[in-house]
Amino acid sequence: MKLRVAATVLGAVAAVLLAGAPAHAQAKPGDHKDPAKSGCWNSAKVVKTASIKSRMDGNVGTIKLWWSGKCKTNWVEIRTASSATGTISVYAADGRYDRFSFKKGNKGRHWGNMIWANNMCAWGSASIQWNGGRGGQNGAGTTAKACG
């Protein structure tokens, strides 16, 4: 009986928390789409750049935050070792984000999906690893915010 009451209370708390989730975090036009396939890349420019760094190996790549004025979207592109795997993320100030996992290859050039970010700040991050991440073989980088 005590277990059933606890489960009911937890369920009620979860329902209240979910009901209070911000409505502005709903998907917008362009969210989670590939910038190359959508054509948004054709009218885009790099707005922020940063290094991907490893404690063991120093600079191990570059992260770029892109903006398409035509599509009103941002996304992240990285360049690193072709042996690296990892995750690319882009964030909008209203709480939406996209996370994209990449595999080895493509000559170390990878990009994530877009997030609509018209008239708001956006930024990106990436984390990578190579050789399974053993012995400190990993790195991370984050761009500054671009607001517009």
Image: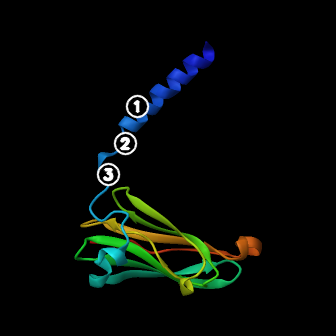
Q: Residues within 10 Å of mark 1 (few under 14, many from 20)?
A: few
Q: Residue 103 or 145: which is nearer the viewer?
A: 103
Residue at the spot 36% in from the left edge and 38% down from the top edge = 20
In this picture, residue 96 sits left or right of residue 125: left
Residue 104 drawn above or below residue 107? above
Numbered disc 3: secondary structure: loop
Q: Residue 83 or 128: which is nearer the viewer?
A: 83
Numbered disc 1: secondary structure: helix
Numbered disc 2: secondary structure: loop
The image quadrant of residue 80 is bottom right
Residue 96 drawn above or below residue 119? above
Kindly report the distance in space between the C-alpha atoms of the residues bearing marks 3 and 1.
18 Å
Q: Which residue is mark 1?
A: 16
Q: Where's the C terminus, which quadrant?
A: bottom left
Residue at the spot 65% in from the left edge and 78% down from the top edge = 54
Residue at the spot 32% in from the left edge and 55% down from the top edge = 27
The residue type indicated by label 1 comes to Val
Residue 81's disc is none
The residue type indicated by label 2 comes to Ala
* Circle 2/circle 3 CB separation < 8 Å: no
In this rendering, which labeled residue sits more in front, label 2 or label 3? 3
Locate residue 72, reporting x and y percent: 25, 71
Q: Residue 134 or 85: which is nearer the viewer?
A: 85
Residue at the spot 40% in from the left edge and 64% down from the top edge = 91
Residue 26's disc is 3
Locate residue 51, reporting x and y percent: 53, 82
Q: Earlier in the sequence, mark 2 or mark 1?
A: 1
